[in-house]
Image (cartoon, rainbow, N blue to C red):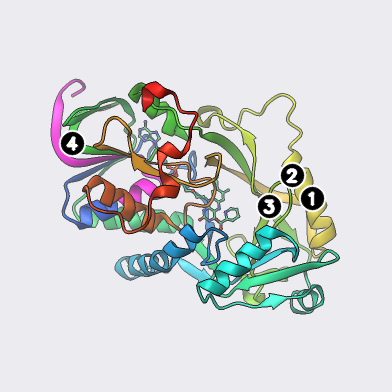
Amino acid sequence: MAGQVCSLYDTIVVGAGIQGSFTAYHLAKRGRETLLLEQFPLPHSRGSSHGQSRIIRHAYPQEHYSQMMAESYRLWEQLEAEAGVSLYRQTGLLVLGANTNPEFQCWCRTLVKHNVPGELFTTESLHGRFPGIRPYHGEVGVSDHTAGVLSADRALRAVQDGFQRCGGALHDGEKVTDIKPGVVVTVTTSRGVYQANSLVITAGPWANKLLAPLGLQLPLQTLRINVCYWKEKVPGAYGVSANFPCFLALCAPHHIYGLPSNEYPGLVKICYHSGSLADPEERDRLPETSALPDIQILQDFISKYLPGLVPEPAVVEHCMYTNTPDEDFVLDRHPKFRNIIIGAGFSGHGFKLAPVVGKLLCQLTAGEEPSYAMEPFRIHRFPALPAAAL
Ligand SMILES: Cc1cc2nc3c(=O)[nH]c(=O)nc-3n(C[C@H](O)[C@H](O)[C@H](O)COP(=O)(O)OP(=O)(O)OC[C@H]3O[C@@H](n4cnc5c(N)ncnc54)[C@H](O)[C@@H]3O)c2cc1C
Ligand SMILES: O=C(O)[C@@H]1CCCCN1
């Protein structure tokens, strides 16, 4: 079959992580003939969309994401109804920081602006309400009652099933090896050759590998993240049933966040919002000098801050972040090949927004006016890109 043109699609989407899967779902719902290509057999744990849980929240310090969250919640609910599965569990989110911290003040402002139900906590009221937390001197909190946890693996499956129910073709275990731009784009894979009027690249940490032959390199850093679970001394003390919320501690230089025990009974997920630079092809090959500083930071934090947890990780899983310099997404057309659309750089916070990201990438593909202002997501915000590419 290799070397032979198989079919002409309206759109081919490369990468069946949460962003590519939602893009393909929206395209197929509009009746566009869509092919979704995934290099690995599904499900897999090599990219960024696997695992049991992700935080969803209205709270965002940046206005452009806060604006999208109302629609994102609605689209998640719609998917739950279509698929007949539960994907969201409300837990609330507690954001913790010094009240003089400008970032903390930003979170408070957008919560008020968007009328998100929540509460402010002083150091004393924090401890009273959440006895499992030992707040720092002068630390305060603000909560988003609407926040909770998305079941990530189940969500990915639901959106891929929804795409196929709308007539979309999903080929897994099929790697894209070449892309020839043109009015009709030709895509060569490990199994065949396909053509489409437009192409969407949502390849997660592999984005720059696919973009290099297309003359474009985005300023993306791919990071290996340690996903750590910590044992409760009293099972359930930090659990969803005890109303323990998700939390985000605004620590420098990188935040620390946690999700209540649920997916693995007796274990609380607490992670560092950064990791070590890694090629996704060699994710688990650690640099020789690796002292895993993130885990040490987490251990210190847990010993001082969450005394009801054993300060040794019980389970460590791995996942990839693909970060832009400003941690805003890239949602744009290729600067030269306008029928090639790129979704990349989700910087460790893209899961909750995937229903809206998918809709925006679908609108760009269809040549429609996107529903939200796209300036924060444009490629041209990176001034240092090679001129040849632009
Ligand atoms: C530890 C961790 C915690 C996170 N927590 C949160 C959170 O709480 N809330 C939140 O909203 N977000 C969170 N995120 C971020 C969120 O999970 C990501 O933003 C999102 O999953 C990115 O999805 P993606 O589709 O861009 O990438 P991916 O899931 O990596 O998908 C890209 C896909 O493209 C495929 N691909 C690549 N190259 C090719 C090729 N040549 N041919 C065919 N297929 C190809 C890959 O195999 C992969 O399946 C977290 C991420 C991590 C790692
Ligand atoms: O997107 C989120 O809600 C989380 C916040 C903490 C870091 C990981 N991502």
| Residue at which label 1 appears | 299
Q: Nearer the viewer, mark 4 or mark 1?
A: 4
Precedes in sequence: disc 3 or disc 1:
3
| Residue at which label 4 appears | 196
Does the segment drawn in magenta span residue 15? yes
Q: Can you tell which quarter of the image residue 333 is in?
A: top left
Task: Name the amino acid type tagged 4.
Answer: Ala
The residue closer to the viewer here, 86 or 12, is 12
Crowding at mark 2 (Cα within 10 Å: few <14, some 14-19, many 20+): many
Which region is colored magenta?
A: 1-23
Do the CB atoms of the residues marked 3 and 2 lie less than 8 Å apart? no
Query: Vertically, is 215 above or below 302?
Result: above
Side of 285 where 167 appears, left or right: left
| Residue at which label 2 appears | 295
Task: Name the amino acid type tagged 3.
Answer: His
Q: Nearer the viewer, mark 3 or mark 1?
A: 3
Crowding at mark 4 (Cα within 10 Å: few <14, some 14-19, many 20+): many
Precedes in sequence: disc 3 or disc 2:
3
Task: Name the amino acid type tagged 1.
Answer: Gln
Residue 226, horizontal then vertical, whole percent: 64, 43
Q: Is residue 374 visible?
A: yes
**SS class of the residue under badge 3?**
loop
Residue 57, horizontal then vertical, whole percent: 53, 65
The residue closer to the viewer here, 387 or 54, is 387
